[in-house]
Amino acid sequence: MTLIGPHLCAAALLISSYVDAADVEMSYVGTLTPTGRNANSDAPVKRFELYSFLTGFGSDSATLFFLVDEFGGDAWPWPERFGQMQLNTKNEVVSGRSKIRILHTHAETPYPLELRRPLFEFAERLRAGAQWQVNDDNYEVVADKVVGDFDCWQVRIESKLGRRQMLWVDKENSVVVAAERRLFMGRGDEFLLRMELDTILPVDADRTAAIQKPIATLIELQTEMKRRPDEIRPELNSDQLGIVSGVIDDLQQESVSTRINRLASVIARDIKAQSRRTDNVATLAQRFVGQNLPDFDLKTIDGRSIKRTDLSGHISVLHFWEYLGEPLAEPYGQVGYLEFLKTKRQRHNVQIIGIAVNSLTEDPQQSAQALKSARQLSKFMNLSYPIATDNGSVIRKFGDPRKVGAKLPLWVVVAPDLTIADFRVGYYDIDPNRGLYELDDTVVDLIQSQPSQNSGAK
């Protein structure tokens, strides 16, 4: 790592001005670069920027706000790119979001990669030759080093799993001046994650007040949206869209002349696009709900046929999705909970039909691979409900949501009289105890509406 570069030299000029400051703005630049024998190039596959705003610097009630911008190799959706944490006098997180991460997709698999927080959490242990252990990590102060004009402790961190990190920590204020970490993704592919301080600026009371307004709006927004911190899907549900739409104008006004303004513009564009897709999907649903089920003929991955008439007398859930065998990763939990719903409701004549939408199935030279992929997923998830394949011709009869800019999955619930009872695009929320509870509620309503059924389904 080239430690004495333009970023560190520029930041070091400001070192004396932030020493006694209570509130500080910091920014870092970083890269993710392939290394080792499998690296085809030494060029970074991802670049990122980390912005931090620290209030109460050095006190027992410091607050750290962070915001990450990523370039290349996929990225977190905007609701997961920022957060806030409370720190004690040892720079330990006592509440809030404790991890700052980037997201990189390698070999078709997304990997969350944790970044070092701007303040080192073991500052009181830093001295020449110091060694200590925390969980599986061994820390050692291996040198004191001038980095740019920063007087730093150089700290090496090694774990039992072979992970290695190196940090350069400012001696006076425990600010992490630079960091690098060796990590592995895929089948042992090695990468180097680097970050270095770009700017550090003291902030006066007026500036603090200006920055805290959009931060407060963002944190409240993040709380009200109730997304998981590890959510990698960018799609928002209708409630979330409504929440964001209600504050985006204020956020854009509040963030003028702050680093948050760029994020506010990203959010505004995303909300406009997602709202348009949501309206288009709602129009599709209105076209199909209450209408007769279109005619179709599907072939399952084990060679059986499923036709429209096979659904007569059943409550059927048609799940149009990719059903890809690689990579075997989330959100396959949705598929598992479909199996759970089938087991729970099958005594009420409920059936599930998975439909693997894959254009390769119409190509004789590639259809075998498409079938293999669907079989892999079915076996991996131990599914008992049938999986059929569709080259796109069947989903078009139901109004393919991809034609209006939305993404699969598509869920179609069919009543026993072969009318479409519900039409849903996107993922359901999951309750660990109730599974796909919104879908289950729709199914239960249909069960209870049938003259031949008692009210035992709950």
Image: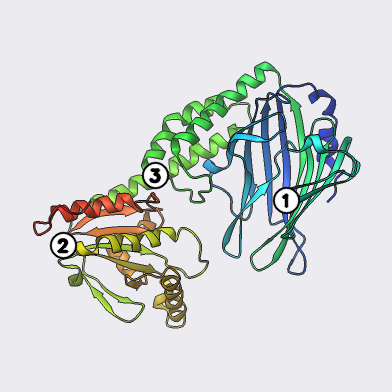
Three-letter amino acid code of the residue under disc 1? Thr
User: Which of disc 2 and disc 3 is earlier in sequence?
Assistant: 3
Which numbered mark, 3 or 2, is in the foreground of this view? 2
Q: Give residue 60's position: percent from left, percent from top.
A: 68, 25
Q: Give residue 329's position: percent from left, percent from top.
A: 51, 62
> In which quadrant of the rendered view does residue 263 lie?
top right
Q: Say whether residue 456 is left or right of residue 133.
A: left
Residue 31, numbered circle: 1
Looking at the image, residue 221 lies above or below residue 365: above
Task: Tell which of 148 and 87 is nearer to you.
Answer: 87
Residue depicted at x 42% and y 75%: 375
The answer to whether mark 3 and mark 2 are in CB contact below 8 A is no
Residue 416, numbered circle: 2
* Residue 156 shows in the view: yes
Three-letter amino acid code of the residue under disc 3? Asn
> In which quadrant of the rendered view does residue 207 lie?
top right
Residue depicted at x 84% and y 30%: 172
Three-letter amino acid code of the residue under disc 2? Pro
* Residue 288 shows in the view: no
> In which quadrant of the rendered view does residue 176 lie?
top right
Q: Which residue is under mark 3?
A: 237
Secondary element at tag 1: strand
User: Which of disc 3 and disc 1 is earlier in sequence?
Assistant: 1
Residue depicted at x 81% and y 34%: 11
Task: Tell which of 304 and 40 is nearer to you.
Answer: 304
Looking at the image, residue 362 lies above or below residue 205: below
